[in-house]
Image (tube, helix red, strand yellow):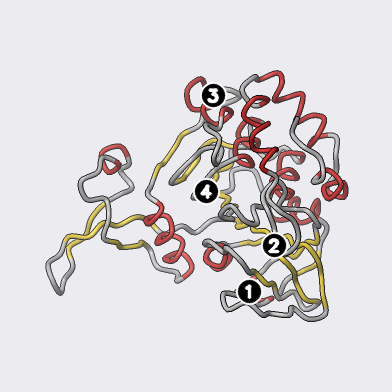
Amino acid sequence: MAKFLSLADAVAQMVHDGDTLAMEGFTHLIPFAAGHEIIRQKRRDLTLIRMTPDLIYDQMIGMGCAKKLVFSWGGNPGVGSTHRIRDAVENGWPCALAIEEHSHAAMANAYEAGAANLPFAMLRGYIGVDLPKVNDRIKSITCPYTGEKLATVPAIRPDVGIIHALRADREGNVLLEGITGCQKEVVLASKRTIVTVEEIVDNLGTTSPNSVVLPSWTIGAVVCVPGGAHPSYAHGYYKRDNSFYIAWDKLSRDRDGFLAWMDENVMKKGPDAFAVHAKGSAA
């Protein structure tokens, strides 16, 4: 059953050096506050998994948290490169970063397989592309019924899965609405889970036809962090801060400028200040 914890306590208890960590959210509900707390607690040697590593993984990798990145697309959405990830891959700064690249379909299927406690995912994909030449984790299998050759990838079973959601009730059940991506699968596939939410309520008030309710027994810790997805957005709570993404492109290009910004806006600020910080910008 889910425990209600502070963000600092949840990360301290559940995220350890050397863990495999998945933090998901597709444009919507990206768990920035949790990523910042991991940076503050100086976790190291993490294998980071995310279908679309963007600003939060750029920050975590730039601050030396990771040794490997498993992903299917990387960049600053609508703007350009993630310069700290690129610097780590190309120059080993602040430490070398191994990469394992997949397609979106393969990552989604791998999360599904992990959630179902299966050893691998099978899909029609990787036909006529070069990724299998550079990723030896992509293999194939012959269907015993039709003889069709199908692609396979290992199931994703993270040590820790972290997502941001809209709200939780007082029993620890969690609601997601809007663009939901693969957050449900991450929670079900992970050994330990942290869910940050905008608010704790008496009744979840599910109204949307695409509502997802994660029952309390699937979650390790629930943490109330208003604004915890900024600069991404939370459906019905706040909009995407497009100016932040644009400003990040400039300040993250320079190592010294990046470190100065992180020191001022992340290292010197605790999780309780996140909702206030969410109203600012990267400039």
Asked if the residue under mark 4 is in contact with the one under mark 1, i.e. CB atoms within 8 Å, the reply is no
Question: What secondary structure is marked by label 3?
Answer: helix
Q: Is residue 161 above or below residue 49?
A: below
Crowd class of label 2 (few under 14; some 14 to 19; many from 20; radius 10 Å)? many
Residue 241, how many percent across, how many down? 70, 45
Instruction: Look at 43% across and 59% down and name the residue there.
Output: 108
Left or right of 279, for residue 70: left
Q: Earlier in the sequence, mark 3 or mark 2?
A: 3
Q: Earlier in the sequence, mark 3 or mark 4?
A: 4
What residue does disc 3 label? 87
Asked if the residue under mark 1 is in contact with the one under mark 2, i.e. CB atoms within 8 Å, the reply is yes
Residue 30, how many percent across, how many down? 64, 52
What residue does disc 2 label? 195
Calculate the distance from the C-alpha at mark 1 to the C-alpha at mark 4: 21 Å
Calculate the distance from the C-alpha at mark 1 to the C-alpha at mark 3: 37 Å
What residue does disc 4 label? 49
Q: Is residue 120 above or below residue 59?
A: below
229 or 156, nearer to the observer? 229
Question: Which quadrant of the structure image shows residue 212?
Answer: bottom right
How many dots with numbers?
Answer: 4
Q: Earlier in the sequence, mark 1 or mark 3?
A: 3
